[in-house]
Every structure is written in C-alpha cells, then in structure tokens.
Image: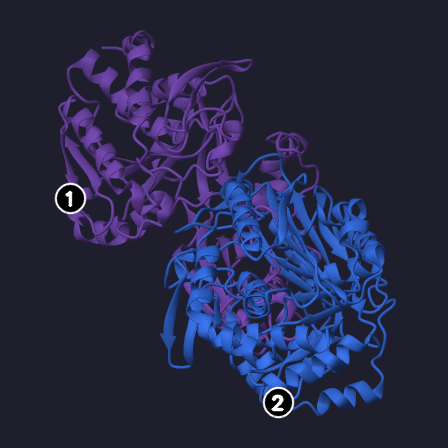
Chain colours: A purple, B blue
Amino acid sequence: MSLDETLARIDADLPEATERLLNLLRIPSISTDPAYKEHCQEAADWLVEDLKSLGVQAEKRPTPGHPMVVGHVEGDGPHVLFYGHYDVQPVDPLELWNSEPFDAKIEDTPEGKVIRARGASDDKGQLMTFVEACRAWKAVHGTMPCKITFFFEGEEESGSPSLIPFLKENAEELKADLALICDTGLFESKTPAIMTMLRGLLGEEITLTGASKDLHSGMYGGAAMNPIRALTKVLANLHDDQGRVQVPGFYDGVPEMPDEILKQWEGMGFDHGKFLGDVGLSKPAGEQDRTALEMIWSRPTCEINGIIGGYTGEGFKTVLPSKARAKVSFRLVGQQDPHKIRESFRAWVKEQLPEDVDVEFHGHGNSPASQMSTDHPAFEQARRALSEEWTNDAALTGCGGSIPIAGYFKTYLGMDTLLTGWGKDDDAIHSPNEKYDVESFHKGIRSWARILDAITK
Amino acid sequence: MSLDETLARIDADLPEATERLLNLLRIPSISTDPAYKEHCQEAADWLVEDLKSLGVQAEKRPTPGHPMVVGHVEGDGPHVLFYGHYDVQPVDPLELWNSEPFDAKIEDTPEGKVIRARGASDDKGQLMTFVEACRAWKAVHGTMPCKITFFFEGEEESGSPSLIPFLKENAEELKADLALICDTGLFESKTPAIMTMLRGLLGEEITLTGASKDLHSGMYGGAAMNPIRALTKVLANLHDDQGRVQVPGFYDGVPEMPDEILKQWEGMGFDHGKFLGDVGLSKPAGEQDRTALEMIWSRPTCEINGIIGGYTGEGFKTVLPSKARAKVSFRLVGQQDPHKIRESFRAWVKEQLPEDVDVEFHGHGNSPASQMSTDHPAFEQARRALSEEWTNDAALTGCGGSIPIAGYFKTYLGMDTLLTGWGKDDDAIHSPNEKYDVESFHKGIRSWARILDAITK
C-alpha cells in the first residue's frame, strides 16, 4: 500500500475526524481546578474508547491526580511512544470569549475555517492529528505502521505532579525506541518545525502577610505595613532596567549560543516586528542586548503571572489588606538548576522584606531545560517528510515553552524525543477564544502519516 | 425633667434599642456594589419609619444614586443637624467571617457582649446611638431637646457622589447652628474624643494594558511586555526607603504641627506598641522620622488598597496578562490640594511607563482635609458632658480617617461640626467580623443624651 492511499483516506475522512475532535473538545477537562475533576475522567474515558476503536489495547490508569491513558498496539519496525495531554487551561477571563469555551464548533473566518474551543490547539487538536493518522493508516493497511505506545496525560497544565512517579513505576512498559510529541507549533504558517531546544520552567507562589487582619486605611494608613507595598517593592526588583533578572546566581549555567546557530536563526526570516505587532506590541521587553528570537528560545526569563491583594471589585474600598499574593515563573535554559534557583529566589525575597511582613512560599513544579540529541536518524527522516507536506522546508528550532516531558523521557526512560506540531502563533492558547485552524488539523494528520511512513521504511 | 430620668430610661430601654439596631443591621446596604441597590432603598425606608415613630417629619429623598433620608422636628433652643450613614462596606473576603455578615446578633466574648455584623460600628450602630438618645428624651420629656434635622446618607462608603449636589440644592433646608456627626471612635476604651482634625481622601484606579490579549509565557515570555511588571515598578516607587511619598509636589500644603499640640498628644498616653501589637505588627511603617500618632493624624499617606492581574485562582497558569490594575488612595492633611495631587500622580505614573504599556485612570472621589473651629461653645460643653459619662476626660484629637462631610458642611452650609463617636480600634470596621461593643452602644446613647442636655441648657 502506498502513502498516497493513506493521504487520500485522510482527506476523505476529514469531516468525521473533525467531528470526533469537536466531541473531545466539549469535555471541559480543566486540570488545575478541582471542580472539573470528573470531566478529566470523562476525557480520559473518551480517549480509551477511541483508541480501542483502532484496535489499541487501551486503559485508564489511576494516579493520585487525574488518570493517565496508556495504550499498546503491535506492529513491525521501530517501537514509538506517542505523548499528548488531554487536560486544558482554565477559561478566565470568561467575558472575553466570543462563544462558550466548551461549545466547540467550526467557524468561518477571513483567514479560513477554524476549530474554536478551549484546548482546540493545546493540546486536544494536536493529539488527535496523530490518532487520526493512525486511524487512516489502519483503514488502508489493516495494520499499524509500527509498534506504538499511546501515552496521554491529564495534568500537563497543572504542573504534572503524577508524571515522574508514573514514569518510574512503569518504565519497562513505556520505554520505546523514540518518543513523538505533538504539543508545539509551526515556525510560521507555511514552515513546519522540529523543536530541538526547550526551556525549563519553575513556578513559585509568594504570599505576604502584614497585619493579622484587614485594616481601615483611615485608622491605620501610614502607620501599618501594607503587604501590597512590600510585594510591589520585591517584584519591581526582579528585573533591572536592562531586563536582566536580579535573582542571585540566576544566570549560572546559561550557555551562549554558538555563532553558527545564531546565524542560522537570523537566516530563518523570523519577522520580529510582526511577531510583536500581531499582539499590539512594538519593542522586545527582555534583555536589551538580545533579539526577540533569543529572548524566547535561548534566554531564561522571569514573569509575574498573577498578582492579587486588597479590594479588587467595583468601586473603591480604603482597606489595608492583611495579605498580598503573586505567582512568579522562570523559564530556564541550558544547565540552569531549578532547585538552586528556587532556593536563591526564596532567600532573595526574604532579604528584601521589611519588618512585620511574613512570607510563605508555595512551589508549582520545576523542570530543567532540555536539548534533543538530533543524531537519531528519525530527525532527518521526519524533517524530509515534513518538507514534502508543507510549502517550505522544515526547520530545527528552539522553543520558548516548557515541555518537561521530553527531558523526563530522556532521564527516566532513556528515550530521545521528536517534537513537532501544527499550532500557529495566533491560536490564542491559554487565552480567550483559543482556536486551531482546520488546515493545521488536516495537514497535521497528513504530516504524521508522512512521518510514520518515513521512519518505518 | 432631669437628665438622670433620661439616662434611666436609656438603661431600661437598652434591650429594645439593641433589637432595633439588629433589625437595621440585617439589611445588606452595601453601597459600592450595584447588586445591593434595593437593599439601600430598604435601609432608607427603615430609617424613615423609625424617625416617624419619634414624631419626626421624615422622608426618603431621591438622588442619582442611593437616597438620602431627611427628617425635621421642632424644639426650643439651638438648631442641630445630625448626620450619619446607613450604607456599609462590602463583606469580602467572606471566608474570613465567623458568621454571616448580615445575620446580626449579640455575642458573648471574653471582653464583653458585642453586636456582630457588617455596619455594627460603621456606621449603623453609631447612627442609632443618637436616634435612641432622642427616643429616650422624647419618652421622658414629651418633646425633643431642641430643633433637630436628621440627615442620613447612603453613599458614604462609595465616595458620596450625590452629596455635594444635594447639599447645594437643599442648603436652606439643611442649614443649622451646628452639625453633629457620630462616625468616629473613642480615643481608647475609657476616653472619649472629639475629633477636630480630619484627613482628606483621594482615590485613583490605574489600569495598565500591554499586549492586546493574554499571551502564553512559553511563547512570548521574555519578549512581550508584562503589564504586571510595569505596574509593580511604578507602585514600588510610590514610597522611598524612608516611607516618604514620591509623587512630585505631594507635600505642598502639609503643615508642621505646633510643638504644643505635639506635646499635648505625647501627654495623652497613646500606647504605640499596643496600637500596632493588637493587629500583629510592631513597627510604624510610615515616614521614619514621625511617631505613629503623627502618621495617622497629621501626616499625609499613600496606600495601595487593591491590586489584580493575571491568573489568581488555584494552581498555576503561565499567562502573560494583557491588563493589570491597582487602586491607590492618598490621605491628605492641611492645605494639600486633591486636584493638583491627582494631576501630579497621573503625570508621574505616565512618565515611568515603558514602551508598549498604555494607562487608563479612573478617579474615585476626592476631598481635602478639614480642621474644625473649636471656638463654638458647644465643643467645650460637649467635652465636659462626655467627661461625666466616661472614666477619663474627653480629648480633642486628630483623626486618620476622612469624613469629608464635615468639610462640606463648612463649605456649603457654613456650619461647624462636632464629631464624636464610640467605636473602638478592634471593631474591625471595613474588615471581616465587624462588631460594636454593647457598651459602646449603651454609653454612646447616654453620651448623646448628656451632650444634648449640655448644649441646650
């Protein structure tokens, strides 16, 4: 049987494949909010049933958090493990959505048809491109292209607390020759990318407490310590006026990119102006001696992802709050050590606090950066296969996001990982009105068929 | 008829008076939140009916916001206007209340009986001490002690937007020889106070916008401007490391207190350690060359009353928010001009914003400080009357809070105002678990009977 027949089958089955994805998107599997626990179970059940329909021996596997879905199917050639995640981000601010986040549907837009829903791009739509490629292959060939292990997680958007214990406990079962992950984007709409450098992530939540209760600023204002004031003083010191992070030792283990890689990046035609202009910005806000591409691919960063304290409703309330809180994250590169940075950050915060302010820290996951070893032949085979499907040749790139699973696969299962995906910069993942282009979904399925064909020849 | 008979009547009627107050407290008249509009009407209606039961010609008077309650009753001697407010603060954070904020009730505590409810101390309990004093007087004498105008506002906790227009339109009707206000506290539990210096208040809300939508920090982190970062940088600059406010021109018009007043304050035995210690603090947080009493009575301040941006729910979300917002207030003294400070603050904020950050300002009321002219004989008469009721002699003091109405009475009606009240530092006004001591309520009613007796002799 030829690859062309599989591609033709994919084209013909697109309406049904889209319908299946819409059904999965209608399950509100928000992993970070305990209120959606049952829906995470529901999404896992849905995937188990869908894999079974492909002849995969699939089951839901319990964890202390949301379940994993694991499926195995036999085949000739190399053994690959495919990873994706079925959980999604929260939907707030809900008022900025133009439609219900879980009322998934196809929309016509000036740029083409899109699938609109929370999780459409991150990661249910991407995950299903691989499943649909396998479905088409099976329909045409009667067998799978190779031995495949399916591994779907339900806690990717909430720090993956159960992942490492699960990998350790099931290492023998999960280990394959190569891992495939579909949770990243196109370099630009006509150019696919295989990500070979991923930033790590460290999350910290700080809660400052001043007085033992909220106070009236008329009675105490001026005399009583205001923890919001203390918090803004600390957070304002995170970056100097050149955009460098001020936590001591933060840049230990940060490598300088070789000139040849920087030159290669320059040659990729990344449009810095458009990248920021598309979201209403004009100037790269990070380290002032770096390009925007370095800022998001090869430089570490620190961001304040959330802050709250005092009265934040309508109108005004002259309160001196007892508590103020912030969520801070660090994107890590090279050999930066998340544990050392966490310790250094906590000590640095404590040093700066005035009298009468207590601090509590709460860690939200940590993962070092990862660097793929691209000498595995599948990388070049996949790059050529992708170049066939898309207008422009595929590129080997960095990635600003953190997909710690790739590092864990290397550490705990000794597997290399090939990361690719069909998301676009305007997919609004983690934002209101998330979407996935029908073209991304369609060409994504075709891309996986091509990759599976290339690496199993 | 003697004062003693009135006081005896007050003592005998205390259980019924308390029951009436509990009924008023059960109406959730939160003025700043539009969801409670009908309850503000309900509280105004309740007061109209209660005044009518005293023979007062009372009515609800519409405004563009919540209604005023105005009542008149004839009598001999001077004409006094009594002002109080029937609206209350919001109740959040609700989870810190040990009982329902509007399920008003009497509680036994180790320190004595308290009336527990939002508004118990600020200002429904205080307002009713005057009404109950009039009720007892009427019961004993058959008449009121003098000609009285009752004037109750429903927007005091939300910036009093209708107040000045109402005062201007009804100046002839409202003007009296002296205004009485019960919205302040005891100097300490055995020492009553007449406040002669009140701070002004200026409220500002700042909204910063970076990107046109929320972004994923994996994709944009480092390169895109984060408005929380910009906001913390600006707010951290509000105070220098000596606690001085850095807005240009802020201290223009701030007088130094005469040495004799500072000495008088020193002699009042204010326990700085206990004042802060009672709320879990140890060190005055304002200007480092001032005492805590100066910080709250005679020095201007700036406080961040609320801040919000990004993801603030459970767990973690690596979002780069589009917007971040803060509410900032300034307490003013002497001749500080709220309009000039507002302009200077806005210009100062704008100057500090980096590229790609837009700002919107929203003003929340402004009032200058006020200084009472204490040469009106009622001040000394009232001071002596209060000294009879309480263990220690009454003091003439400053007040950290802003009761702009006293300044407006002077400006628009040419009236002096005598401000006194029976609240305590631990009443938790504007905070969870607000209370009013039954002793404050009881002795407060008796205090008003004594004051009315003294100023009408």
Q: Nearer the viewer, residue B338 or A265?
A: B338
User: Percent position (x, y) of residue B356?
Assistant: 70, 41
Q: Is residue B249 left or right of residue A330?
A: right
The image quarter containing residue B187 is: bottom right
The residue that mark 2 highlights is B392
Regarding residue A10, the answer to whether it shows in the image is no
- Tell me: residue A397, above or below residue B44: above
Output the chain of dot 2. Answer: B
Q: Amino acid at mark 2?
A: Asn
Residue type at the position of mark 1: Glu
Q: How many marks?
A: 2
The reply, left or right, for residue B214 in relation to residue A81 is right
**Figure quadrant of residue B223:** top right
Q: Identify the image quadrant of the N terminus of chain A.
A: top left
* Quadrant of image for the C terminus of chain A: top left
Of badges 2 and 1, the one in the foreground is: 2
Which chain hosts label 1? Answer: A
Task: Judge from the rendering whether residue B243 lies leftward or rightward of residue A161; answer left or right.
Answer: right
- Which numbered marker is on residue A173? 1
Observer-nearest residue: A428 or B326? B326
Percent of width and height locating residue A435: 45, 25
Could you say where residue A269 lies in the image, as x and y percent from the top left? 62, 29
Residue A54: percent from the left, percent from the top? 17, 22
- Please tell me whether mark 1 sits on a helix, a strand or a loop: helix
